[in-house]
Image (cartoon, rainbow, N blue to C red):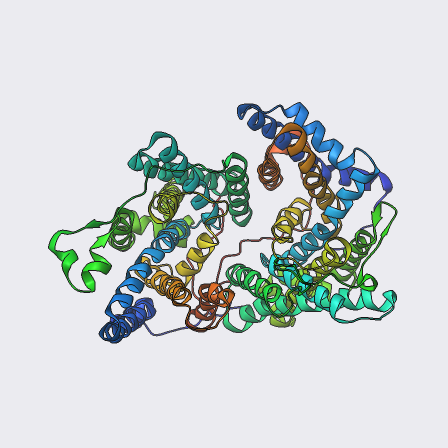
Amino acid sequence: MEGTIVHTPRPSSISRFLRNYGVAVAVVLLILIGSGISYSITPLRTTAVLAATLRASTPLALGALCGLYGERSGVINIGIEGQMLLSAFTAFLINAYVGNLLLGVLVGVLTGAVMGLFLAFMSVTLRMDQIIGGTVLNILAFGLTGYFYQQGLTTPGKLQPIPLGPLADLPLVGQVLFNNPPITYLTLLLVALSQYVLFFTRWGLRTRAVGEHPRAADTVGINVYFMRYANVIIGGCLAGLAGAYLTLEQVGSFERMMTNGRGFLALAMMIFGKWNPLGAWGASLLIGFTYAFQTRLQFMGTIEIPPQFFGMLPYLLTIIVLAGFVGRARPPAADGVPYEKE
Amino acid sequence: MTLRNSSPGDIARRLWRSASVPIGSVLLALLIGAIILIVSGASPVEAYRALFRGSFGDAAALGRTLEKATPLIFSGLAVAFAFKAGLFNIGAQGQLLFGAVTAAAIGFMIEGLPPLIHAPLALLGGALAGALFGAIPGMLKTYTGAHEVITTIMLNYIAINLTDYLANGPLQDTTPGNIVARTPAIEASARIPAIGAIPLGFVIALLMAALAWWLLWHTTIGFEIRTVGLNPSAANYAGMRVSTTIIVTMMLSGLLAGMGGAVETQGIIGRFQPGFNVGLGFDGITIALLGKTHPLGVIPAAVLVGAMRAGSNLMQFNADVATEIIDVILAIILFFVAADSIIRWILRTRAVSEEKVTLSTGWGQQ
């Protein structure tokens, strides 16, 4: 439909920045102002909601990063949900049987990586339709976790918050930012790192080249297949970390279908953030906030609204945000197109 | 796309070429499933025997298979139909739920109608509800560019919550002693009966599959749908209204899914109860892909999956194998069907020249 060439003047760097990160900046500002006002009224509840926001956004941000690495290199990954679910399961199993949280996290990450490898094999080597490839991952993870699920298995514990010295004693900010469990900290680092890697390193340039114009990238000597494999596997690691977060840091146990659509939500966050790590993080914070907010409202129980309406809030908001604010986002040009060497 | 005059022998050869991959995939997947069963300490022979006996062993088992296959034909059709326009409708699950709850509401709220009016009325109501819910992602896509993969998934969760609310609140069964979230049982006049072992819903499903095939290949709108699926810009240049086609396709896809939910309510469950329809819409994706996104290919695929679902209970009971092994096997089948070059290499068959529908055209592009 958009076959005609449109000549647009090159935008200035400020307007480019606003176009890329405008939504994220707006979200962060809104949350900052809103929380400032609400902190002055009910400091305790505000702190709790904001801390919960950051934690609820963690798996979404990690999942969005997973999708981002894949798509920036030209591979659509709708199997994030499955990668998260299976990783959550293996991480939990290791913790339950070995009792080592670190090992559990590592195995979760490894599981995600193996799933990523499988996806890369399907979409890069077999040149399978990538939507089907992702669906295979989702069904496979659902089946495997259900088949090997054991009732009543418990773990010796989960990852605990690590207060960062005196920083954690600051009012509001301390509790929200500097008193978190490890994967939540790690996610913040990974978001910043991904932004840096994708836009300021040779690796990032090559990844984006492969996702935009693989033929040209191939011509200048970039190994398209290798870059796609590597990025999809990196993405798998991140989805695996998200899975480990769910079982080892957030809940502490495994339930069937416990990802509950987070992998798909993460994809929406990636699109909402216009394929930028920082943007996707801003989007994740917004949806994380609705999770935290609805849980809080349900706890308070002062308002007579059926819980199902709170339950659909994150999903409804995602649709509104996608439809109203994102519009026709421009994905990497070669996204979803298998590359065939001449 | 051109109409071909073909001899019976030619048709048989073409049929074998297109059927060899699904059949080979199923066999290979069962083999891998057997390995998983052995590794986890179960007996594949016993498990598969129970699986077969529970799905095709006797008339009752066959009836159960057809019963399970019925809603799956609908959801498979819904997904396959949307695929023809290049749309990936993951939201069949949500559309199906709305169809199911609407049919239940019409089924228990209206009393005293003759069956010949009541049952079709509830069925059409369910279909319409599915169509309306299916139109939302279509409109979101054409007017705002929001990709249907994301919106339909979000709408699934919204549908789960909304129907759950309805069954807990306004439509809840208020008979004394009921504490479960469910609607009252529908009137006998709204039920879709079975003829012997064959559920009437199954016959309706077959008719709808034929209707979908006819619509796609013998009408103008069908031609437009397929053209949009193959090449939207070409369709646009040819003067077709791509946006209208997308919305209409999503509505028809939702209609099929909604009808599936209604048939499930009216023919099997007899009321709406949250959790009873879960998975039907997602199986639809597997079935549509397994049936090569062809309306008639959906039928054998749905019967296969329906048989596995029907037999899995006996398998769990007799061989102590968790029913989820079915999903593992389905995922492997899907893998081999999509990676058809593997099976073709094993069987040494050539590929059929068929209309290729690209599913992953990317997010923002149409």
Viewer can see residue B248: no
Identify which residue is drawn at 75% across, 53% down: B268
Q: Is residue A262 left or right of residue B162?
A: left
Horizontal side, residue A22 vs residue B162: left or right: left
Residue reaching furthest to the front: B176
| Among the 4 quarters of the image, the one containing residue B96 | bottom right
Foreground residue among B1 and B156: B156
Residue most extreme to the left: A166
Q: Is residue B257 above or below residue A43?
A: above
Q: Is residue B194 left or right of residue A260?
A: right
Q: Is residue A42 above or below residue A51?
A: below
Q: Position of residue B99 (x, y in %)?
A: 68, 63
Quadrant placement of the C terminus of chain B: bottom right
Q: Is residue A229 above or below residue A184?
A: above
Horizontal and vertical percent position of residue B313: 67, 37
Quarter of the image that includes the N terminus of chain B: bottom right
- Residue A38 lies in what quarter of the image? bottom left
Q: Residue at x 83, y 46 (%)?
A: B6
Residue visible at 37% across and 65% down in the picture: A296
- x, y percent for residue B365: 50, 62
Which one is in front, A309 or A273? A309
- Exactly how many numbered labels are in the figure? 0
Give the camera-side residue of B76 and B233: B76
Q: Which residue sits at x=29%, y=47%?
A: A183
Residue B346 seen from this side: yes
Residue B264 location (% of width, % of height): 72, 55
